[in-house]
Amino acid sequence: MDASVIVVGAGPAGLMLAGELRLAGTDVLLLEKLPRRTGESRGIGFTPRTREVFDQRGLLYRFGEVETSGQGHFGGIPLDFAVLGGGVLAARSVPQSATEAVLETWVRELGAGIRRDHEFLGLTDDGDGVDVRVRGPEGESVLRTRYLIGCDGGRSAVRKAAGFDFPGTEATTELFLADIRGVELEPRMVADRVTDGMVMVGRLGDGIHRIIVGERGAPPRRRNGPPPFSEVADTWKRLTGIDISTAEPVWVSSFGDATRQATEYRRGRVLLAGDSAHIHLPAGGQGMNTSVQDSVNLGWKLGAVLRGTAPPALLDTYHAERHEVGRRLLANTRAQSLLLLGGEEVQPLRETLAELARYDEASRHLAAKAAGLDIHYDVGRGTHPLLGLRLPRVELRHRGRSTSTAELLRSGRGVLLDLDDNAALRHRAAPWRDRVDLVTPDAPGAAPAGPLDGTYAALLRPDGHVAWAAPGSHHDLPMALERWFGPGR
C-alpha cells in the first residue's frame, strides 16, 4: 500500500479529513492537481459550528485576531444568534485561502503526505483496495490504497470515475463574485435585496472589498474563464446605481444555483466528502462549513475501522448521518435562493417568514440552521435533550487546572465525562480506555452550569456530538461505547 487512505483534493474538506485521519493514527496521502494554492477565496469566514470544530482541534488561535459577529441571515432575513444563547458567534472576513493555509500547516505538522501537481485520472476498486491512476510531474503512475476519498469539488473526477449518481437541478441563474480595491463601499454583510436582484459587500482588509451581485433572471453562460470585470461593474451599477468601474479587480469569478447531491456517499472503498457529494447556491456561506463537517464526521470513523478497533459497519453511519445533513442543506439553500432572487411573487413569503422570525421559537430554528447548530444524529432513544446534538463548549476544572470540553476533544478521541465521581461508571468504561478518555472534573457532583445541568455523565464522540448521557439514555453505557468505538478490550 502506498497509503492506507488517499484523499483527492487539498481544499478545506480534503485537508480537514487528512488531519482527522492523522489524529486517528492513519497514514494518509493527499493528491492535488494544482501545483500551489491559488490564493483565491470563494468562501469568507465560517459559521459558528465550524468555529466550534476548529476550537475542538486547537486551530482557532492559528487564525490570529478574527472579527466575529452574532448576526446572520436566512435568505436575506436578518437573524440574531443571541437567541441561541451561549455567545454563538461566526467568524467574519477570513478568506478561504487563509483557512486552507492554517489547515495545511496543521496537516503537515501531523505528518500527512501532500503531493501537489498530481492529477487523478482513474480508479479500480477490487474489493480489497483501490488502484489510483495519477499523472504527476514525472508522468503517470498507479498508487495503491485501502480507501479512496473524493474531496475534489463539484466537478469531482473521483465521483465520475466511481460511477456515483449525482441527480439534481441545473443552474438557472448566474451570480458574480469579485474582490476589488480602490473604491469605498458600505458593508452589506446580510444579503441585500434590491429591485432586480441582490448584492453583498464585505471588507477583507488591505483595502479590498468582496462583492457579490446577482441579477434576477440573468441566465448562466458558458464561459472558458472568469467573467470580465466590466460585466460585473455594469451589473453592480444597474442594481445599485453605484459606479465601481474604476476599481482594481483583484479576483473575479462567477457561480450559479445548480443543486445536486450524490445518492450515496460510499461505494465500496470509495467515499465522497464536501462539494464532491453536494453542490448548491452558497447562501449563508454554508458550503465550506458543511464540507469541513463532512470530513470531521468521516475521519474518526474511517480511522477506527482501519485501526481495527471498530467494525466496518461504523463506516456506514457516515452516509446515514451526513447524507441527511446534505439533503436538508440543499433544501434550505434552494429556499434561500427563492427568497433572494425571486420576484414580486415571492414577496408574500418573505413577509410571512420575516414575521415568523420575530417569534423566539421560529427565530431559534432559523438561526440554528444558519449557524450550523441544528444537526441531530440518531444515537439511540432517550430523553436527555442533548442526545445526538453537539455539546456546546463547557468550561470546567480537571486535575487542578481550567479546561473545557473543546480542549478535551483536541486529540480526536472520544471523551466520557464522569460528572458524579462514579467509580462504577469508570469501571464499566475501562475496556475502552485505549480510545476514550475518562474525565472526572474537579468538584464532582456539581455539574457545570449550562447545557450539562442535571447531567451525571456524558459520552462525547470525537466530533463533539453526545452519544450517551445519564440520566436519559435508554441504552446502557457499554452498549453506547461498543456502538461508536467498537468492542472493549
Image (tube, grey):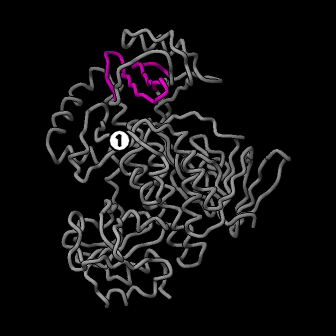
Instruction: Give x and y (percent) for residue 257.
Output: 46, 32
- Image: 6 above or below 347: below
Q: Residue furthest front?
A: 400
Q: Main secondary structure of the magenta part?
A: strand
Residue at mark 1 = 68
Q: Is residue 158 left or right of residue 286?
A: right
Q: Is residue 149 left or right of residue 480?
A: right
Q: Is residue 415 left or right of residue 272?
A: left
Q: What residue span does the magenta drawing correspond to?
A: 191-219
At 43% across and 22% down in the image, what residue appears? 213
Instruction: Give x and y (percent) for residue 360.
Output: 15, 45
Instruction: Give x and y (percent) for residue 488.
Output: 47, 86
Q: Is residue 269 visible?
A: yes
Determine if the magenta segment contains residue 197. Answer: yes
- Of residues 372 and 426, the one drawn nearer to the viewer in this rendering: 426
At 24% across and 78% down in the image, what residue appears? 443
- Image: 201 above or below 266: above
Determine if the magenta segment contains residue 451. Answer: no
Residue 149 quadrant: bottom right
At 56% across and 45% down in the image, what residue appears? 100
Instruction: Give x and y (percent) for residue 30.
Output: 66, 54
